[in-house]
Image: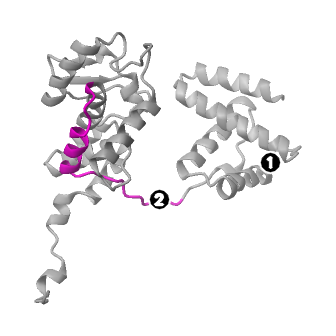
Amino acid sequence: MLKTDLLKIAKQKLVIRNYSKRTVASYLSAINHFANWLIIEKVTKVNDESVEKYLYHLKRTKNRSISSMKQSIAALKFIFSDVLNKNIPSSLNIRFRKEEKIPVVLSEAEVTRLLNSVNNLKHKAILMTIYSSGIRLNELLSLKVKDIDFDRNLIFIKMGKGKKDRQSVLSRSLKDILIKYFEKYRPGKYLFEGQKGGKYSASSVQAIMKKAVKISGIKKHATVHTLRHSFATHLLENGTDIRFIQELLGHKRLETTQIYTHISKVLFDRIKSPLDRLDVTID
């Protein structure tokens, strides 16, 4: 089968199965990359050996992350089972060793400094929306004006990750700044729009965050997603039930949300270092 035909059929099947646009694009990119590799390596027969060689290439040469590897494997499984109607090669049945990475979290004082460093009303509203509701960047960009319920103090996140709708809180402070934002910018369809209308760009939000981190003097490697991590951690530290946090974040599994219990300051404050029990002289 020609590569163009393969991509065309794959796209058609993905759309029919109601995959999100983002997932469709990711799958097609992964399939295209694999097809190009087959051509470059002059592979004439796709089998367990060639698939494993490709996965080794992704990890060793391209240094792909675990999440990226998982996405490529999911795309290849889809090709074999749904497009080619063949058995999935055993080399794609992989269980990765779990990465124990602790997310970067800003303290409440650091978030305050960060937000206060932003003078532009629209830029401040963007960062405040992410931090106060814990939404993902792509969810923020997809927010529409009608998704903000000022009467019930709710934000509706439509078709978030996993194509699931959910709600988050509309804080008092965010409500106040959004009212001012609406008066000045008068957005049309989307809550935050570009200069020519349409969705605001992800790169623009990332640039706003990067500039704010620099101006506020924060030394941590803080990204837009750090605001989401900070939102969850601060809720936990202030006594919010972890299952409610799970719902606000849109996590499918509680285990995903439990990462924040490992970095909660409240828990660490209860621990007394053995050094503090010693009578050490400090000159």
Tell me if residue 213 comes above or below residue 140 in the rendering. Answer: below
Whether residue 171 is visible here, answered yes or no, is: no
Tag 1, which secondary structure? loop
Measuring from the top left, give residue 79's x and y in whole percent: 70, 34
Query: Which of the labelled discs sits on residue 47, or is there none?
Result: 1
Tell me if residue 169 comes above or below residue 57 in the rendering. Answer: above
Q: Residue 205: which quarter of the image?
A: top left
Tell me if residue 29 comes above or below residue 145 in the rendering. Answer: below
Relative horizontal placement of residue 185, taking residue 9 as reference (left or right) = left
Residue shown at the point (84%, 48%) measured from the top left: 41
Does the CB distance between marks 1 and 2 fall below 8 Å?
Answer: no
Query: From the image, which quarter does the N terminus lie in?
Result: top right
Relative horizontal placement of residue 240, taking residue 74 as reference (left or right) = left
Q: Nearer the viewer, residue 128 or 84?
A: 128
Relative horizontal placement of residue 199, taking residue 83 as reference (left or right) = left
Residue shown at the point (75%, 32%) measured from the top left: 84
Q: Which is in the foreground here, disc 1 or disc 2?
A: 2
In the rendered image, residue 115 lying in the magenta stretch gets the answer: yes
Relative horizontal placement of residue 98, taking residue 112 as reference (left or right) = right
SS majority, magenta: loop
Q: Earlier in the sequence, mark 1 or mark 2?
A: 1
In the rendered image, residue 89 lying in the magenta stretch gets the answer: no
Measuring from the top left, give residue 189's x and y in whole percent: 36, 11
Query: Which of the labelled discs sits on residue 236, or is there none?
Result: none
Q: Nearer the viewer, residue 159 or 83?
A: 159
Measure the alpha-carbon separation of dots 1 and 2: 29 Å
| Residue interval drawn in magenta | 97-121
Measuring from the top left, give residue 177's x and y in whole percent: 19, 25
Report the residue marked by disc 2. Answer: 99
